[in-house]
Amino acid sequence: MPMFTSTSNDPAIVVTEIDPENGNGDGNDDGGGNDDGGGGNVTPSDANEVLTGEVTGQVGQQYQTKWFSFTVNSLKTDQSYNSITPDEGNTFLIANITITNTYGSPLPFGTFDWFVDDVTLDDALWPNKPESSNMMPAEFMLSDKETATYDVVIEIPGTKQNPSLKNPAFMYIEVSATGEELLTFKMPFNY
């Protein structure tokens, strides 16, 4: 499974609060619901702590990894994206993401960094092939301090009326050059 690979073994992630009104756990399709209260969950009271391991994210918060910062600006499901529609019985998960390279030199990014996983799936669900300029390219480079905002569109089984996934999460996993999992970022969502 392709993932961002680092050359450092530093698993630190720093969270900076941007807008406390977003990601309020209200159960809407903004990714803020399903807060399981487990370790690594981010709340405004601990938003500046250094986190490692598994992190449950919230819409609208900026997350700083060792190499880049990112914000999931919105996370929603829809029956279409621009002129694209999912297969019969499926839905699109649409994540709008802002990424800033903070590493000090150019870094590769792309749709290979993001996916959906669920206990009901044998394999993760990967983003659709980019079909519009708003969709994240399959691969692109960001120079140091450069920022880009794109939509990641992933076709998921089921609909709001007939959801197929039990505990779905929009995810990012960061691994070291040796294959050690440094960070698992997940953002649970509802249809």
Image (spheres, rainbow, N blue to C red):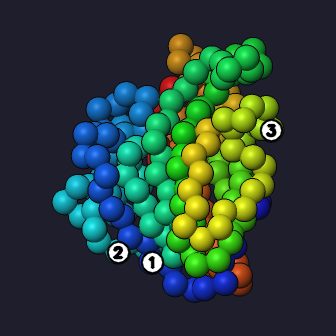
* Residue 51 position by quadrant: bottom left
* Residue type, numbered disc 2: Val
Mark 2 / mark 3, whichever is N-terminal: 2
Describe residue 74's horizontal placement relative to residue 81 as left or right.
left
Q: Residue at x 80, y 38 (%)?
A: 129
As helix, strand or loop, the secondary structure at mark 2 comes to: strand
Residue 88, horizontal then vertical, whole percent: 75, 14
* Residue type, numbered disc 1: Ala
* Residue labelled with disc 1: 12
As helix, strand or loop, the secondary structure at mark 3 comes to: loop
Describe residue 15's horizontal placement relative to residue 115 as left or right.
left
Mark 1 / mark 3, whichever is N-terminal: 1
Q: Residue at x 71, y 84 (%)?
A: 178
* Residue type, numbered disc 3: Lys
Contact check, label 1 and label 2, Cβ < 8 Å: yes
* Residue labelled with disc 3: 129
Picture layout, residue 44 above or below residue 6 = above
Q: Residue at x 38, y 70 (%)?
A: 14
As helix, strand or loop, the secondary structure at mark 1 comes to: loop
Q: Residues within 10 Å of mark 1 (few under 14, many from 20)?
A: some
Question: Which image quadrant: the N terminus?
Answer: bottom right
Task: Give the mark count.
Answer: 3
* Residue 21 position by quadrant: top left
Q: Which mark is residue 50?
A: 2
Residue 7, horizontal then vertical, whole percent: 67, 84
Q: Residue at x 37, y 52 (%)?
A: 61
Picture layout, residue 1 above or below residue 53 = above
Q: Residues within 10 Å of mark 2 (few under 14, many from 20)?
A: some
